Amino acid sequence: MPDGSIATRRGDSGDTGLLYGGRVRKTDARVDAYGSGDEAVSALGLARSLCADERVTSWIHEIQREMFTVNAELATAADSRHLLETHFPTITIENTARLDSLLHELETEVSLPKSFIIPGGSAGSAAIDVARTIVRRTERAAVALIDSGELQNPEVATYLNRLSDVLFMLARYEDRERPFEPYSSGEDGGAN
């Protein structure tokens, strides 16, 4: 293996290292959780590159940074949490409160129709909606870790739950100058 390569080959046998807490199988619930979180960060990066509104891209960038904190929590074994807390920030009520504040701001600036919205008004908003669904999956994985005692900070799940709401509204904010395409079951002739 050449020096400086990112290929360590340590995971070739199907295990991987946690941030703190040793090695686990790649099928471990914790790896699934932070893998989903990593997907969310990447999907948010795609969204950020596609969004036209500078405020949206700035908010997304900040969310990406906080998702690294989420992923650090998900990638640390419960009995090694003290090591994480010594070296890195963790998700707190203040993180969730900032999302609540942003959500309130977005809700005052965007009027939603009284029906489901079909994603895809623009490339940027569609990418945000994809990121939102990945965040929801990450939240489900975090809840499973909390339920099994492997994640000791329940604020992680609360943060992810609020984040999915924020992302829904960010996508609508990105498209606020476009008409929303409402879902219609067709039973009423298409009128909502």
Image (cartoon, grey):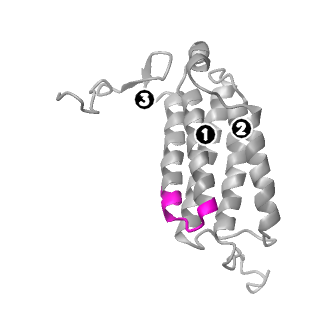
Tell me what residue is drawn at x 73 percent, y 46 percent: 99
Say if 55 sits above or below 61 in the image: below
Query: Would residue 52 be counted in the magenta stretch?
Result: yes
Quadrant of res 1: top left
Q: Which residue is mark 3?
A: 26
Choose top left, top right, bottom left or bottom right for residue 170. Answer: bottom right
For the residues carrying marks 3 and 2, which lies nearer the camera in this image? 2
Does the image show residue 47?
Answer: yes
Label 3 to label 2: alpha-carbon separation: 29 Å
Q: Secondary structure at mark 3?
A: loop
From the top left corner, tell me how far across and down residue 22 is, in percent: 45, 15
Left-right relation of 148 to 23: right
- Dot 2 or dot 1: first in sequence order is 1
Residue labelled with disc 1: 66
The residue segment tinted magenta is 46-55
Q: Amino acid at mark 3?
A: Lys
Residue at left offset 74%, top offset 40%:
96
